[in-house]
Amino acid sequence: MRRMKKNFAALAVVAMVAAACGGGDDASDAPADEPAAEEEAAAEEPAEEAGGAASEEDTAAAVEEASNEDAEAAAEELPTTLEGWLELWESQRAAIVATAAEEGWGLGDDGILVGPAGFTIDTNECPEGWNNDEGLDDGVITIGVTTATSGSLAAYGNIYTGLGAYFDWINDQGGIGGYTFEVDVKDDEYVATKTIEAWAEFFQSVKPLVGHTLGSPNTFSVQGEFNSQCVPQVMVSTGHQAWGDPENNPWTTGYQLSYASEALLWGAWIEANTEPGVVVAGLVMDNDFGLAYEQAFQDFADNSDHIESFEIVRHDPAAATLTNEVTTLAASNPDVFISMTAGNPCVLAIQEAARSGITETAQAYFTPSVCKAVSAYMAPAGEAADGWYIVGGGVKDTTDPKYADDLYISWANETLEEFGGDATISLQGEGFANRGLVWEQIFRIAAELEGGINRTNIMLAQRGFAEFTHPGLLDGIVINMNGNADAYFIEGSDISQFDNAAQTWVQQGGTIDLSGLSPNCAWVAGEGC
Amino acid sequence: MTLFLQRILDGLFNGSIYGALAVAIAISHRATGRVNLAQGEIGLFGGYMALAMASPAASFVAGAALFSNLPGHPFNLWVATLISVFIAAMLAVALQRVVMRDFGESTPQRALNRSIALLICVSAVISSQWGGRARVFGQLFPSGADDYLNVAGARLRYTTIGAWVVVIVACGLVTFFMSKTKAGLSFRALTDNRASSILVGIQPKKLMAIGWGISGALAALAASLAASMSLLDSSLMFRTLIYALAAVTLGGFDSLRGAVVGGIIVAQAQTLVPGYLGLPTEMSIVAALMVLIAVLVFRPWGLFGQRPVERV
């Protein structure tokens, strides 16, 4: 009996140590040549020289300008009917297609893809047998997606329920360019190694025309494969600044406001709205995602006379609670608390900040843009969510009651429900109303370019996506991309504060516009842009 | 000093969860002589049952529509939790009687494999029914910003006090059952000397089922307490299980008191070691396990376990 107990105890210890030491979900677990943020990388260079965000001066000026504006200020003349919007988008697409024809964008006989502002891809370097039309054989375009639909970031899986519903609606309207669409989602649990496995399967069996990934570590883990296989990695759902690198990773595009821009906007707001000498506390998810925020804000803090210190505690992405981490931060008596996390920890950070007393004494507390979804993260946090600030990336939450009468949002919610979605879930609305519309425009532009929908035209449609007006975003946010000169779709944002009683984000001042001001980011692991 | 005290108080909450699950593991181990690795998942099933009973029928929680046929649904969270504790106990009994009937007679290796298989099966059922998405469980105790006692500048939260009251009451009931009832005394006799107990007419199968039932109930209680302070998701009890295994090994597999004390030590190690050694939080589990390894080296029967004596 004694021996049996000792045997079991030894086995249990080995198993527990193995469990403790395994299962990393950070791209740092990936091969050494793949990007991974390092603590030492922080603040090597002044923020204004870094890529992925506008300069500190431009950012501060934009924040000041926006603070003097009214969020309700009359916007430029926008359509008042859905037909009007359709006409506007058609004209904006036509302008892009006309520019492409005038500028001679396209895939030449020499295998060189030429696009806007110096954007080129040499398809001769693609693998032997690479086919620009792969994934178009049977009239159905499959969009391969990896995302978390389980685990602590599972709520983000709702984005693809919404996106799937959007393409169901597109299919119902007759498709685009003679094709219908299918969104094929694989759950990677936000674990980079599972993302790699999922995409190995996609590349070998499904062979989708385009792919999409959610999460910074996950996107890093397969970015090299996408670019070496010459498959579009379209509008990935992560704001890491590294996606703005059209020269080195031309097949990868981001979509949302970069984390570097968001961090600078936090800094600019803090400088404009707090007394000098502030202590800022950052709760950082310990992976490429959280470290992108941390590095960008550290750069800012190092250059700021206003910020006395930036205290950091990192947390395990899989942590069930954040009590210990927030307790440590509370001991620094922060004047400003910034949550740099995602998924379930969005809720936990808000609750723990309240329980630890941080929100009683701090002048301001920020939750990140990826935690903006009201139904997923703010409502579950309860009363503790009241008063939190956000650099929100300009996105309208489709469940926010103040948009109930918004022409586009109400149409989106009705249509989402009609096609099997749930309009009470913010992130489904995000997938449908925000991202779905842009995906549609990309395919429509590609269909109108010479050669129709294929992989290179999908990239041209994105790289030349100019001056698009999106009713799912706040007025003043322009979606713009311009080849190698501007590699970020969205560079504007709102700064808002949450009103828990009304379950709404209340915009503070006007919309911040930094469009076209973010330099590209040739990301190097351990060094940054 | 305040930070140190706050960390101690923070660790106490986790200690209550680890302690409750560790006691559950210890009881099922006493019943069968084997460790049931599915203990956490059985408890998690109970947690989801509580959620379903406390959620309106129109919610997207699996089972809520089913329970809506019962009068008074959706139930108060406490009522739902108590009913779910009973359901988890019944589930554990059913699993023991049907699937793990001869669990105690299996070799340690086979028993380990079977309990891993059971863990995976119960986990798969939970994932299929409730998905991988986290759910807001609700608050069993007041847990707002002002809900705490000031202890020398640190915050002793009502949730921590409440969790410990629940765990102490539950352990008290188990102790009462073990020491004051015929079934409990039979259970103790069986675990002390199986052969002699059978000779005097004690029915081991019935008592093993009772042992598993008590374990299932305690595990469900632990899951509900843990969920009330964070979120209920399908991975909630897996890590908790690792800490609880450390706790029960530390305290001794044959000591309920040891399991509770082990839970407190493991939770404090998890809180204090990374906090003061500057280790990444991912390493907190390693800190707890290092304590465990040290105990196994110097006192392999655990802090409160009985040193095995063999007749020669």
Image (spheres, helix red, strand yellow):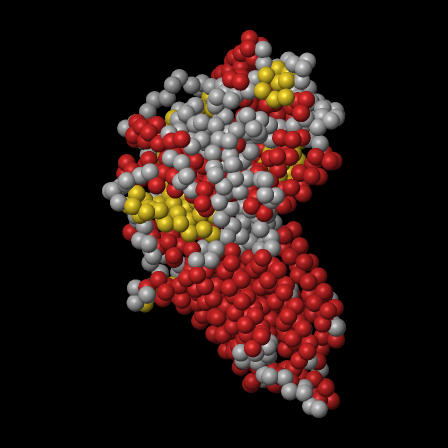
State which quadrant residue A519 falls in: top left
Decide if residue B155 is in sight here: no
| Screen quadrant of the N terminus of chain A | bottom right
Answer above or below: position of A378 versus B205.
above
Residue at the image point whose x is 48% and y is 55% from the top: B280
Q: Picture coordinates of residue B25 (x, y %)?
A: 60, 71
Q: In the visual, does B34 lie left or right of B266?
A: right
Count up the numbered dots.
0
A326 or B52, which lies in front? A326
State which quadrant residue A332 falls in: bottom left
**Residue at the extreme top:** A102
Q: Picture coordinates of residue B32 (x, y %)?
A: 68, 76
Q: Picture coordinates of residue A484 (x, y %)?
A: 51, 22
Residue at the image point whose x is 33% and y is 24% from the top: A73
Answer above or below: position of A226 versus B286.
above
Q: In the visual, does B4 lie left or right of A249?
A: left
Answer above or below: position of A477 versus A96.
below
Q: Picture coordinates of residue B26 (x, y %)?
A: 59, 74
Residue at the image point whose x is 68% and y is 13% from the top: A109
Decide if residue B308 is in sight here: yes
A477 or A386, which lies in front? A477
Residue at the image point whose x is 53% and y is 62% from the top: B286
Q: In the visual, does A340 lie left or right of A420?
A: left
